[in-house]
Image (cartoon, rainbow, N blue to C red):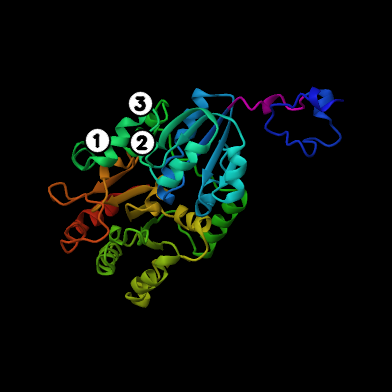
Amino acid sequence: MNFKDLKVPRCKNYSGYKPCKPYYNCLENGCADEAGDMGTKILIISLDALGNVLDNTPILYAIKRKYPVSTVYWMTLPNAEKILVNNPFIDKLFLWNDESRMIARNIEYDVVMNADKSLYACAFANEVNAKKKLGFLLNDDGKIVPANESAMYSYIMGIDDQKKFRENKRSGVDIIHEVFELEYKRDRYVFNFSDEEKEFIESYKKSISYDSGKIYCGFNTGCSELFPNKKMTVEQYITLITDILKNPNIFVMLLGGREDTERNNTIYNEFNAKDRKRIINTPTTEGIRRGACYMSVSDIVISGDSFGMHLAIALQKYIISWYGLSCWEEIELYDYGIKIFQKDLECSPCWKRVCPYDLECIKMIDLNLIVDTVNKFKK
C-alpha cells in the first residue's frame, strides 16, 4: 500500500497509531464502527470561572440537535476538568496547556465556539483553524470583538452597564445559545456521577444515618476568592441556622471548598452538642467531585452566586439564592427555587471586588424569608 493511497477513516475511534479493535485493520477492511462518523467537528472554548464552565454545558444538547452527527471537543482550564468528565456529549476534552493547544491548532474544525471574553481565549480562537468562528475574537489592535452578528447582544452587555445591570432580563444560558446560533430550549446543565460516586453517596448516607423523612438543608457558605463579597457573614449564617434548627424535621449541611474549611468550622463550633447532632459539617478538601457527592444529599441549597450555586442547579436542587454584586437576571434556576436581591438598591448589581458602601446588599438580605422558605419546603 502506497502512503499516498491511504484512505484514513473519518472515525472518532481511529487514532493512526494502533487498531481501535484488536486484529482489525481499518485501512484494508473499512471502518469497524458505523456510529463512529466524526461528522461536524466542533471546538468549544470555555475557560474562565468554574461556574461559567458549568453554566455553558446546556449548549451541548442544542449542538446535538443542530449537528446530530458531530464530534465535540472542549478546551478548558485544568481546574475545570472535573466538571466536564463523565460527560456523554464531549468526545475530547483538552486542558489548557502547551501540548493541548498545539494539538488543537493542528485540527481543522467546522465550527469554533469561543464563550470567553478574555484576551487569551480570544487569541487562541484567532489561531484555531476553522471554517466558521462564533463568539469572540481579537482584532488587529488586540481588542476583543464579536466574531458573528449573533454575539452582538452579549458583547454590548459587557461594555454597557445600563444594559447589563438594568435592562437585561435574559439568562446567561439563553444568551450563550444566541451567541453560538443555537436553539434555546431551557436544557439543563450536564453533570453526571460515575457508578463509583453513586456508590459513595449511598455509603455516605449510611454513615450519617440519613433519614429520608427529614429535610436536608445545605449551606454553601463560601465563594470564589476573586469576588469575596458574594458570601454572607459568619454571623448571618449562625442566625439562619439557629432559626432553621427550630424546625425538628430539618438537618443542616455545611458545604464548600477548601477555602471554606475554616469558615465552616467556625460556624459549626458556635453550636452546642445538642444542635450539632443535626448539623453535618461535610469535608471541604476532597475536591469538586466529592463536594458534589456531599451536596447531592441535600434537598435545599442556600447559596450566593458562586460555583456552589451552579453545582446545585446542575444537581437539580431547590435553590435559595441571594445576590448583591452580581446580576440575578442572568441566573437560570429552571423554576425551582427563589432569588433574593435588593431591587431598589441603586448600587446593586455592581461587580465590584471592593464595596465602598459597607456591603449594604449583604446586610439587607432577608433572613426571615430564607427561614420561611425552608420551613415551607416539601419533598
Q: Is residue 172 left or right of residue 61?
A: left
Q: Earlier in the sequence, mark 1 or mark 2?
A: 2
Q: Residue at x 33, y 74 (%)?
A: 271
Residue 47 visible in the shown view: yes
The rendered magenta stretch, by its main secondary structure, is classed as loop
Q: Is residue 364 left or right of residue 127?
A: left
Q: Residue at x 48, y 37 (%)?
A: 126
As measured in the structure, the alpha-carbon distance from the residue carrying label 1 to the one carrying label 2 is 23 Å
**Could you classify mark 1 by the number of other residues whose Cα lies within 10 Å: few (under 14), some (14-19), or many (20 or more)?**
some
Q: Is residue 367 left or right of residue 377?
A: left
Circle 3 SS class: helix
Q: Amino acid at mark 3?
A: Glu
Q: Quadrant of the N terminus?
A: top right
Residue 281 visible in the shown view: no
Which stretch appears magenta?
A: 31-40
Q: Are marks 3 and 2 in contact (CB under 8 Å)?
A: no
Residue 161 at x, y percent in the picture: 21, 43
Q: Which mark is residue 149?
A: 3
Residue 167 at x, y percent in the picture: 19, 36
Quadrant housing residue 246: bottom left
Query: Label 1, on which residue?
Result: 169
Number of marks drawn: 3
Query: Label 2, on which residue?
Result: 145
